[in-house]
Amino acid sequence: MTRSLSWVALMLLAAVPAAAGEGAAHPNILWISAEDIGPDLGCYGDEYATTPTLDAFAAEGATFTRCFANAGVCAVARSCIITGMYPVAMGSQHMRSDVVPPPEVKCFPEYLRAAGYYTTNRSKTDYNFPAPPSAWDENGEDHNDWAGRAKGQPFFSVINFTISHESKVRDAKLRAQMDELLGKDRHDPATVPLPPYIPDTPEARADRAQYYDVLTLLDREVKKVLDRLEADGLADDTIVVFWGDHGVGLPRGKRWIYDSGLRVPLLIRWPGAIRPGTRNDELVSFVDFAPSTLAMAGVGVPKHMQGRALAGPHRDEPRDYVFAHRDRMDETYDLIRAVRDKRYKYIRNYMPERSRGQNLVYMDMGGTMQAMRRLHAAGKLKGAQKQYFEPTKPVEELYDTKTDPHEIRNVAADPAHAEILQRMREELEAWQVEVGDLGMLPEPVVIEEMRPDGERAQTEAPTVRFEPVEGDDMRLRVAIDCDTPGASILYGLGDEEPTARLYTQPFTVKRDAGLVVHAMACRLGYRNSKTTAVAVEDPED
């Protein structure tokens, strides 16, 4: 087999525009992500919320009012965010799966790392494939975010907060501590607003009030991060992005592709580039996060990415539609696709025979869901509350989110909406064809194609070569290759770990017989390679 520069080196070098090597600015970028929250913050007009930090933060930058997850559950949404690819295009659309993405697909922080960024993640990954060592300089709880970078090195840091997760909303121990934790800021269940599809029960009120309580706790955690950034003298030099990973972790929110499960907060503060107090009503999808971040960093966007850059010097045109999907959720199968413009939501149910109210063990642990099931069994649900437990779903759903923000009045059969229905149907079908929707194939068929006989392939061990440097007998050129298509290569020198540095192109080292180059390779969905260790040749050899 002919040796060549590794696949990742070629792709990474192609991804960085020439200007990046000519002193183009690489701003620091900080992501603060929160689990299981909708735009239920004061800055979005929610008067019941107590979120002073996020409200003040929003006033310093832009509030995006139409940001949507691609799916209403964490791993599927994060699979999209980290790759800039729709999960249905690479087979990661099922909750709790373990896939092998196509060879060109990378975790986008790798492109930042190749451009000189220090990349850190604290600490959730959950991508529906193992997090590769090539993406992060530091990944996990045991690091201090941007503090480990070299002097003058730009950073991309992700800090994820779990305090707002679905499990916290129903956490009885946490509920018992809320008076002590929040005092006067605690939310009264008696006054909490409930959506029309949720029955008014003590359980529903307690859960939703606790949801607002954990949002206040989240707000306080965000303040600590922003204060630390300020104390480190970095606030004016850092783009800060706050986002939620999908909708609220309560019934008909999380896991669903109604707005209650997809619409999330997105706040961006970019000193000197975004005017404070900006409100942006453009449609934004999670598939846009990766290309947008690369564009803001001054790093080229790979052609295989399916999103659009919503900010930066090479900003793309606004999108007309966002797309979403629901597939297997843990042990429960379904197959739903959706498209939304600024006003209308079209939903196509490919398994209409399956009720929305299928059992799902983890979801059924919540008090609100248990109360809903109890009332349904007793025949006591009313109006929109019944929809969730209808024995079947309509093949098509169409909602006017301007007049029906809770999406409870399906107008798909209304002749007055026939043209809109047809337009949205065509847009959805065209998107499915464009991305090659793998959800149309049985999951076992797709997984068998990725991992024949259930065996996970291993990335080939890299080859390290030393070559003379013309005109310098005391230095050697080091080239590292890997035969696995799509592989990324990492290396360390001397006592460094083999994952210490990301390899993008040949480099030179001093011709010192005591120096050892340790190299390993990885590819998304594959097992990491074995480590190759090669000693630098003695200058007298």
Image (spheres, grey):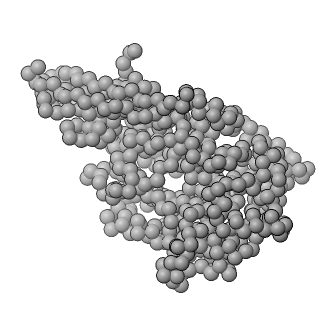
Residue 422 in picture, x, y percent from top left = 82, 43
Q: Is 134 rendered above or below residue 141? A: above
- Position of residue 531 in the picture relative to residue 17 (left or right): left
Which quadrant of the figure has residue 28? bottom left
Q: Is residue 315 visible?
A: no
Taking depth in this image into account, of 103 and 299 the one nearest to the observer is 103
Q: Residue at x 39, y 40 (%)?
A: 134
Please identify the residue farthest to the top as the structure is shown. 1
Q: Residue furthest bottom?
A: 184
Q: Is residue 430 visible?
A: yes
Q: Is residue 498 above or below residue 96?
A: above
Say left or right for 193 vs 36: right
From what the image shows, is residue 500 above or below residue 210? above
From the viewer's perspective, tell me whether residue 21 is left or right of residue 270. Answer: left
Q: Is residue 491 above or below residue 289?
A: above
Locate residue 509, reporting x and y percent. Answer: 19, 32
In depth, the one of 440 and 266 nearer the eye is 440
Q: Nearer the viewer, residue 170 or 31?
A: 170
What residue sits 59% from the left and 73% below the top? 210
- Looking at this view, name the residue that lies furthest to the left: 540
The residue under the point 8% across, 21% down is: 540
Residue drawn at (36%, 18%), measured in percent from left and top?
3
Where is residue 431 shown, x and y percent of the image?
69, 38
Foreground of the two, 318 or 347:
347
Q: How many marks?
A: 0
Question: Looking at the rendering, in which quadrant would you find the N terminus?
Answer: top left
Q: Quadrant of the image for the C terminus? A: top left
x, y percent for residue 339: 71, 47
